[in-house]
Image (spheres, helix red, strand yellow):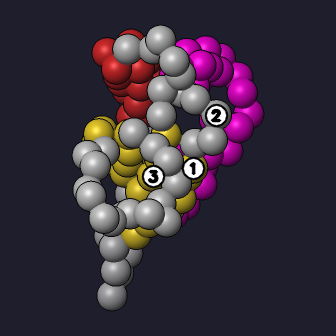
Amino acid sequence: MPETGVSLNALFSLRKGIMEEEFAFAFRAFYQHLHDVGFARGYHCLKRLPLAGFAHRLPDFDYQIIIEFADAETEGACYDYVRKNQEPVRSLHLAMNSKVAEGAQFYLTTSR
């Protein structure tokens, strides 16, 4: 079965004093840049809701972001692009990450 896409998932909380709207503005700017340069093709921003009696083994987090890519090669190229830490993505990434508390978790998923 062909690969239908790859998603980068991030589980995180915001730093104390950071409003959700501040993070959302910074994230959208970061995402839009990744989209404009041809890497990302969609995203979802989710807020965790408590579920009594479940999820005891999950890390502590308040939000999940999913950034969608066409395939693993595109996601890998995007990762390399961000890791180079050059402008303009450097400032956009810093503006977003400066609002996130330590301990964020990242993982990749794909549909098969």
Would you name the residue on which mark 2 appears? 102
Would you name the residue on which mark 3 appears? 9
Against 6, is 35 above or below?
A: above
Q: Quadrant of the C terminus?
A: bottom left
The amino acid marked with disc number 2 is Glu
Q: Considering depth in this image, is 109 or 55 the residue closer to the camera?
A: 55
Q: Are marks 2 and 1 in contact (CB under 8 Å)?
A: no
Q: Secondary structure at mark 1?
A: strand
Which residue lies at the image location 41% right of the left edge and 20% below the top edge? 23
- Give the foreground label among 1 and 3: 1
Measured in 3D between alpha carbons, the distance from the residue under mark 2 to the one under mark 3, in whole angstroms, is 16 Å
Q: Considering depth in this image, is 51 or 18 the residue closer to the camera?
A: 51
Q: Are marks 2 and 3 in contact (CB under 8 Å)?
A: no
As drawn, the residue found furthest toward the right would be: 84
Percent x, y for residue 17? Answer: 47, 12
Label 2 Cα crowd, 10 Å radius (few <14 / some 14-19 / many 20+): few
Percent x, y for residue 27? Answer: 41, 25
Mark 1 or mark 3: name the one nearer the start of the chain: 3
Would you name the residue on which mark 1 appears? 105
The amino acid marked with disc number 1 is Gln
- Give the foreground label among 2 and 3: 2
Which residue lies at the image location 51% right of the left edge and 18% below the top edge? 16
Bounds of the magenta segment? 71-99
Which residue lies at the image location 63% right of the left edge and 41% below the top edge? 103
Q: Quadrant of the N terminus?
A: bottom left
Quarter-wise, where is residue 28 in the image? top left
